[in-house]
Image: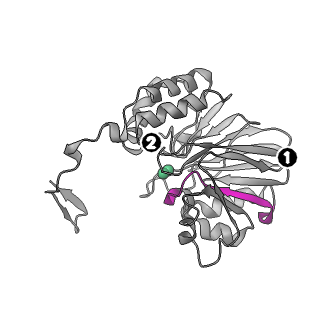
Amino acid sequence: MSLEPVELYRDKRHICLMFSDLIEEDGAAVQANQFLIVDGDTGAIIDPGGNLAFNELFMGMTKYFAPNKLSYLIASHADPDIIASLDRWMTSTRAQLVISRIWERFAPHFTKVGKTENRVIGVPDQGAHLPLGQSQLHILPAHFMHAEGNFHFYDPISKILFSGDLGVSMMSGTEARSPVTDLLPHIARMEGFHKRYMVSNKILRLWTRMARQLDVAMIVPQHGAPIMGQQAIQDFYNWLDGLSCGIDLFDERNYQLPSGRIDPIARQYIA
Ligand SMILES: [Fe+2]
Ligand SMILES: [Fe+2]
């Protein structure tokens, strides 16, 4: 386990850090990445994660600027591994929450009463450009990948595309620190997740058509390793274009009245 973040990008005033290893390796929670983007004396946290990651991420941030300088908590969607720590961030900083308009009124359920008052920026479905320090982040539509209101974030300075649950691979936090430059051997670690969590091939193809217009140096998902370099990124787009997933694979067999039972003592499903 390493608490030191991976430096994805750095120049004089702009830094992108990935924290990949803030959760117990053999714990029950899935490995997750959290991101800190620093621009001058301010910054944003992308997909801050659950309570497990809060302390280390907060400490990591204070090496770059004071907590009251944090501009945003940016959430790709509203899952527990994305913003379950919202209450603590809202208490410890003055940051605004940036989240899909369709989750805007659900997010306050993560916090104590009043914590989110006048601090939520609801992003419309079409996405937007969001100023950050002297730079800006592009909030890109990524709906149904996998949440109904879902965004990805493109940083034009680092050319990093933060892709939430798209491009996710299942591995340890230590492994997640090394970017993947050869996609083929990596597909086995992405396939199961994408087939079940992505909604349909139609959506994937609409997304790749949009993403191909961007100059991307690295695609960085919220679980597992970054995908780096032109070849691997093109191969990733091509793989998505041909992937059947979600409702493409579901038929009447998936909607039968259940016959198995759950043993609550063993916490197991018995067919
Ligand atoms: Fe998710
Ligand atoms: Fe996730």
In the rendered structure, which segment of residues is drawn in magenta? 66-81
Q: Residue at x 56, y 28 (%)?
A: 209
Percent x, y for residue 225? Answer: 54, 38
Q: State whether residue 31 appears in this view.
A: no
Task: Look at label 1 and name its amino acid.
Answer: Gln
- Local packing at callout 2 (Cα closer than 10 Å; few below 14, some 14-19, many 20+) is many
CB of residue at label 2: within 8 Å of ligand 2? no
Percent x, y for residue 241? Answer: 46, 27
Task: Look at label 2 and name its amino acid.
Answer: Met
Magenta highlight on residue 71? yes
Seen in the picture, residue 92 relative to 6 is either above or below; the reply is below
Q: Which residue is mark 2?
A: 170
**Residue 64 in which image quadrant:** bottom right
Q: Nearer the viewer, mark 2 or mark 1?
A: 1
Q: Which mark is residue 134?
A: 1
Q: CA distance from mark 2 to mark 1?
A: 35 Å
